[in-house]
């Protein structure tokens, strides 16, 4: 009995109160329904068609004027909230648009979106089976299936969902380090002299950035030369490994790339693996971008040798077009993730639970609370089947090949690489005023200014979005990225036409 | 002109194809509408009321039987997908339920949910202004406003959204390390002897875990004693700092806690700050849990001294009940996040863009692609105002105080700490069979078994969810957590009644 008996719940009183709460609730319900309608009608479907704008360009000041971004003391009305939603959508880049070909992600898959919405409504945090039973098991199934595609027998090994491919590449450093030098867990990297890792100069910057974050330092992240096609130079890798050993350092990891960020190049995994075996190094393959190709019988040869890797980063939110974010780290070693990271917090990972606590998988992660990023990908997989993903991938590569051959012979276009391996394609557009000036001393300098100018026009019109960058000796070039299989050959022509329309008359 | 003139888009042909795509689209539209209805009716509202179950307990095998978790080659129908959604919801823990008091998060705020749904529909990645203009500016405003609540003048400094408080605590290590020893960026932690940090033995495990991940090692993460109330013992801190210096190590950081995970204790920030000044150490305050109290004039005194910190972790998804995940790292040093982490990837952070690239904030992060976690919190702030958050916080503390005084005198209940500081309350429940046995030698051992048994019954009935754990010499006790302001005093009595109903007759 409660000490204070006036507090015993009286049914009648409780009912009255529930009524008040129902009144409050119906206001919320009304808002939620109107908001859901607005989302479906005005955000999702109004924005995904070709006639809408990719971006409604506005300067920071203009956006601040259009949306009162500052939090205030008092609340605003439901009407105002709905208007705010529309404004946030209006000034946000339309990444679902078929002509958003600017990043290694795009499109809003309807199944992925619905599953994100369900995830949000369930608001889980995935660390124990107790709190996230379905998501825990779902992660296990999906990760095993992905490991099968990597080529590890029965999909054996382990894996986790990560908040992005950069952190997944960090897990590779952590697992490799622990695998060879478990004493680093207690003693830090001080336990061994100058831990040293190797990756291509064209690899994603995350390996270098994470090497810093993880106490190893950029000097000890050796950048291996890439050849003209953007692939890691295996001879240079070996000579850099030898240099490090002679320097008294401790080589422990090579991070190769399957689908580099800019070139879309696939590093030669078999010879790299042979060197890793020879020098007893961990082989990590960053397939964040190219990993999706594993699901196509036609294109998976690009990743030949990936089955020799110790670990793999693979982001379904890239080539497979799952919503942001869906990144995985996979390893063929079944215990290393747990051994390297467990801290056994008693308040969360109690061992006297009534179920098998092997299902409490949170201690593998450096995160504690963690969003469930699995459902969107799993749900897309259910909705499309592996067959659907394969068709999607094949379509992307077909579009990419079509675009490549289309601009190859088109006046004003020049490919950086004649035969790109993945679905990102690099090219220069040469305005009329620059044609025939190739031998002039300031040609490169002038060409360098073209892409930014076209990009500015493009964004201000909102007709498409494609990125550009320089690379080494190469001046600014466009990199168009295909991972939306709703695109077709006509869209490919549209992109070339549009670049030409925006850039033809540029004088630099 | 395209080289292949047959590829020029012909308007008529294009229209035909668009029609086909509209047919495809209307199938998607129909599915999305039905899915949205299901979410609003059957997931969001059906689950948030007191008469529904908190959890529909099922074993892993039962769940695998109920839901075909394995990805397949072929797609399933829209009908089946809708059924799957319902099943996923059914077997997922109802974290929105008022009686889910198991973790440091709960409830599904309707405004937060709508904003998550909008975020998903816009599918942004926040790294450049170009791709995420609204979210970039919104982050800036929200983080500045949060820094004002911390007490830094004008909200000056810097900050980022992080994938969870653990990684936010990692950023503290990274910033402190770079601030004092910038050469660690290139040379790694090898640049200085044994970098050493200090945190309470009752601090969240993430500091230790991240110290390992970041190459420093658990041995160099010194755990400072906590007093009986769970607060860091300042004398022990100083003696551990002195020990480290005498040992030739390099102390650089103290991570204090404002609202510990289990005790809800607030470390004494002013004396800790004085020691940090004396020994030239960075003061980080992990206010992941307690930070929300800064928004209440009545309760912000708990964090007195936080304005002296160099950096703060504050998770709006905890005490402020924003949806998963919403975590921030704040620092009063304006440049350190950028200096410590920038890698200046040319393909993303081009400096020749046509707008002010100071708005391209992605290089502060160790993530590259990154979900927009700001909108849900910002939108809640708009919908409630600061006043609304203050009422929310005051309600939580009022409930917590009520619950504490209710069980204080109630038979069978025993508080671990008589006056908990935050809204998590620790207590033992002593079944009838154990009462009066306090002096028996196996009393503690028997009491240790009570909480797991009650928890099992509770979960199998689905009537509430509350967690338990041991701590040091203390055998298993319950820790009930309040961060849902829809709860009232009657719910507090319900919780005690329910524990009593489930536990009274237990014989251990």
Image: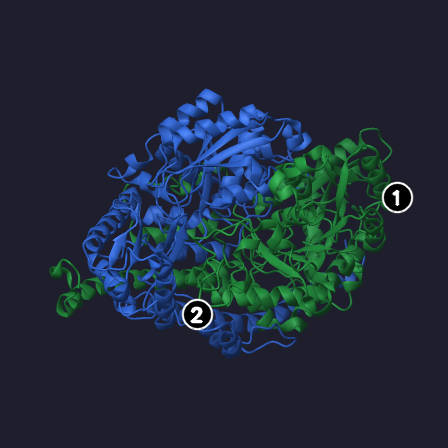
Chain colours: A green, B blue
**SS class, disc 1:** helix
Nearest the viewer among B68 and B430 is B430
In the rendered structure, the answer to whether residue A357 lies left or right of residue B190 reads left
The subunit carrying tag 2 is B
Q: Residue at x 53, y 74 (%)?
A: B27
Viewed as shown, does residue B219 lie left or right of A255?
left
Residue B244 visible in image: yes
Whether residues under marks 2 and 1 lie with C-beta atoms below 8 angstroms apart, the answer is: no
Q: Residues within 10 Å of mark 1 (few under 14, many from 20)?
A: some
Residue B159 locus on image (x, y percent): 48, 36
Frontmost residue, A93 versus B42: B42
Q: Is residue A125 above or below residue A61?
A: below
Where the C terminus of chain B falls, by quadrant?
bottom left
Q: Quadrant of residue B98?
A: bottom left
Residue B210 point in image, percent of width and height: 55, 42
Q: In the image, A114: left or right of A507?
A: left
As rendered, which of B459 and A79 lies closer to the eye?
A: B459
Residue B152 visible? The answer is no
The quarter of the picture where residue B264 lies is top left
Q: Position of residue A300 (x, y in %)?
A: 77, 64
Q: How many residues crowd mark 2 within 10 Å: few (<14), some (14–19), many (20+)?
A: many
* Residue named by callout 1: A235
Residue that sits furthest to the top in the current view = B278
According to the image, label 2 marks what residue? B89
Same subunit, labels 2 and 1: the answer reads no
Reply above or below: A4 against B72.
above
Please give the label number shown on residue B197: none
Q: For mark 1, name the chain.
A: A
Label 2 to label 1, Cα distance in Å? 54 Å
What secondary structure is marked by label 2? helix
* Image coordinates for residue B287, horizontal then vertical, percent: 40, 40
């Amino acid at each position: 009995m409660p000490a204070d008996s006036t507090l015993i719940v009286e049914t009648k009183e409780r009912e009255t109160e529930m009524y008040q709460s129902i009144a409050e609730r119906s206001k919320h319900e009304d808002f939620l329904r109107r908001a859901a309608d607005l989302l479906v009608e005005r955000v999702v479907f109004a924005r995904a068609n070709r006639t809408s704008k990719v971006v409604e360009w506005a300067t920071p000041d203009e956006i601040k004027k259009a949306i009162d971004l500052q939090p205030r003391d008092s609340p605003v009305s439901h009407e105002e909230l709905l208007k705010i939603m529309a404004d946030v959508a209006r000034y946000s880049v339309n990444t679902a648009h078929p002509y958003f070909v600017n990043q290694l992600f795009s499109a809003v898959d309807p199944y992925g979106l619905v599953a994100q919405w369900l995830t949000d409504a369930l608001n889980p945090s995935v660390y124990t089976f107790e709190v996230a039973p379905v998501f825990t098991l779902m992660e296990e199934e999906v990760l095993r299936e992905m490991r099968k595609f990597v080529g590890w027998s029965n999909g054996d090994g382990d894996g986790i969902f990560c908040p992005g491919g950069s952190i997944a590449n960090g897990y590779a450093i952590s697992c490799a380090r622990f695998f060879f030098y478990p004493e680093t867990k207690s003693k830090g990297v001080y336990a061994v002299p100058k831990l040293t890792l190797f990756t291509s100069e064209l690899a994603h910057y995350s390996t270098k950035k994470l090497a810093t974050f993880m106490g190893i330092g950029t000097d000890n992240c050796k950048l291996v030369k890439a050849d003209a096609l953007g692939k890691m130079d295996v001879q240079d890798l070996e000579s850099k490994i030898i240099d490090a050993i002679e320097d008294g350092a401790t080589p422990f990891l090579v991070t190769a790339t399957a689908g580099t960020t800019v070139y879309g190049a696939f590093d030669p995994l078999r010879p790299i693996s042979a060197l890793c075996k020879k020098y007893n190094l961990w082989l990590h393959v960053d397939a964040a971008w190219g990993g999706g190709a594993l699901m196509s019988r036609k294109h998976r040869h690009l990743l030949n040798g990936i089955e020799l890797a110790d670990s793999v980063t693979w982001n379904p939110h890239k080539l497979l077009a799952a919503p942001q974010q869906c990144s995985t780290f996979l390893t063929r070693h079944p215990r290393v993730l747990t051994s390297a990271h467990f801290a056994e917090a008693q308040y969360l990972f109690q061992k006297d639970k009534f179920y098998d606590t092997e299902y409490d998988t949170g201690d593998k992660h450096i995160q504690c609370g963690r969003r469930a990023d699995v459902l969107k990908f799993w749900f897309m997989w259910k909705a499309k089947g592996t067959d659907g993903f394969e068709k999607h991938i094949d379509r992307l590569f077909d579009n990419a090949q079509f675009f490549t051959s289309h601009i190859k012979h088109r006046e004003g276009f020049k490919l950086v690489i004649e035969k790109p391996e993945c679905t990102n394609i690099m090219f220069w557009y040469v305005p009329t005023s620059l044609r025939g000036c190739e031998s002039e001393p300031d040609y490169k300098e002038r060409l360098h200014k073209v892409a930014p100018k076209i990009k500015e026009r493009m964004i201000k019109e909102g007709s498409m979005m494609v990125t550009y960058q320089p690379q080494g000796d190469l001046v600014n070039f466009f990199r168009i990225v295909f991972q939306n299989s709703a695109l077709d050959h006509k869209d490919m022509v549209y992109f070339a036409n549009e670049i030409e329309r925006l850039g033809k008359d540029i004088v630099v």
